[in-house]
Image (cartoon, rainbow, N blue to C red):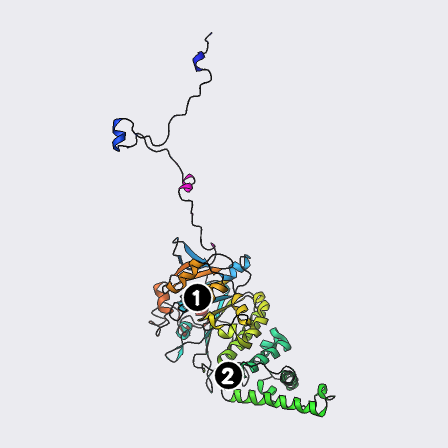
Amino acid sequence: MDTEDDSNVGRLDPPALEGPQVRRGRRAGTGWYAPLVDPAPSTTRQGEILNPALIGSPTDEEGIPIGSDLLSGSPVAHDPFTAYRLKRITSPSVVVLGAIGSGKSSLIKTVYVVRAITLKQRRAIVLDRKDQDGEGEYSALTRAYGGSLFQMRVGEGGTRLNPLDPHIREVLGAAGQYELLLAMATRANGGEALDHRWEAPALRVAHRRALGLAEAEGRDPVISDVIGFLGVIDGVGAWRDYSPAARERMHQAGLGMRHLLEATLADQLQGLFDGPTSSNVSLDSRLTTFDISQLPQDGPAMGLVLAVAHSWTLGTLRKERGMATNFVAEEGWDMVAGPIAEHMNARQMLARGLGLCNVAALHHLSQIPEGSKALSLVKEPETVHIYRQDRADDIAACARVFDLDESARQMLPQLEQGTHLLKIGNRQPVHVDHVRSTLEERLTDTDGAMLMTSRQAGLPDADAGSDAGDAAGADA
């Protein structure tokens, strides 16, 4: 029987050498280290240790394409409705900030209008404020996609919206419709709050009497009905036990409101709200544009059209559920400041439940004073696109409001046109290069008239009617 060699007991043989082996000997000292054998095979999983600072995907896999991450080159996509459904954000609203000419309008047109309406059950409604060759900058785009274009004009020939339309009252109720009237009166009053002890009650009673009159006559109420009852205290049971002095004060308060609304409707708002809603107004198209570019820039008209159109949108969504809608205001100060913003914010929970995403573009965040209600409305959206900031106070305001670190703050004045910081919820901002196709560049040109007709662009003609709208609403 063979016996084991005692010299091998307890000895551990090393494994065979793997990986690169350098030459040994005299030449090693002179720098000759060519390997003797090939390296051992490995995998990318094992190779992760070679790059400990791995860059993850900047955004979620689902969403509308926006562009590319300038740090990693990864594609960037985001959709507020999808993120809200997946509980990654708690508010579907969007705010876009930046200096003039930084690229805000191009982003909104592509991501929140053109690309959005190519998805099923999506719609975009735009308050078009920028004048371009005598009409709004969205007018040509709306016609190219066969959408609905409503041109709002002071005087004759424009579209009329009725703040007392039953379409609005069905979703807001009589109380909500009164709040809309109150917001309109406050905006017409230069933004100064009405006296809630006298003026507001006078308006409330006049509104109720106007609704009763229209119902008795079998027609829709209009704002002139309300004006007719302001200052009239005879036959109002709630005021019968008032002292003569109190009745006179209520009478004077109502007269003041009458004069305010009459003058505003006759001058700054003529043809906009002083009658029934125009018969052609509907939100059936994938793309609907309210062209307010020809309205006075410094008056209440633009903000009031915004308020009434927003209420009309809520009424439509209440009746026709299932359409996720982007409500876009390119210059959206009325959406974040003043009585119109407060009225819209009061309906924010209703808007979320009905599938409405408010998209507001702003220039100077520093114009909102610290502690104002407007600042809380700017903080509410959890999708924020921040473009170049040229002023030190705007940079400081963005850093403070959106909790940007020092590196992000230093980037704000250096952002090139078309690039921006995208902040989604509590995530760190992503440096995004907004990418457009050649066709989109032509369709979203904001510095001049559209460079091609809808036929040249390969889009349906405006005359195609509902077929064009259906084509624009096909799956992406």
The prevailing secondary structure element of the residues shown in magenta is loop
Identified by mark 1, the residue type is Ile
Q: Position of residue 187 (x, y in %)?
A: 54, 81
Q: Quadrant of residue 474?
A: bottom left
Q: Position of residue 351 (x, y in %)?
A: 57, 68
Q: Looking at the image, which is closer to me, 378 or 270?
A: 378
Is residue 421 shown in magenta?
no
Judged from the image, the secondary structure of the residue bearing numbered disc 1 is helix
Q: Looking at the image, which is closer to me, 240 or 275?
A: 240
28 above or below 196? above
Q: Which residues are the magenta region?
A: 42-61
Is residue 46 shown in magenta?
yes
Q: Looking at the image, which is closer to me, 67 or 244?
A: 244
Q: Earlier in the sequence, mark 1 or mark 2?
A: 2
Furthest toward the right, the residue is: 241
Identified by mark 2, the residue type is Leu
Residue 272, labelled with which disc? 2
Query: How many residues crowd mark 1 within 10 Å: few (<14), some (14–19), many (20+)?
Result: many
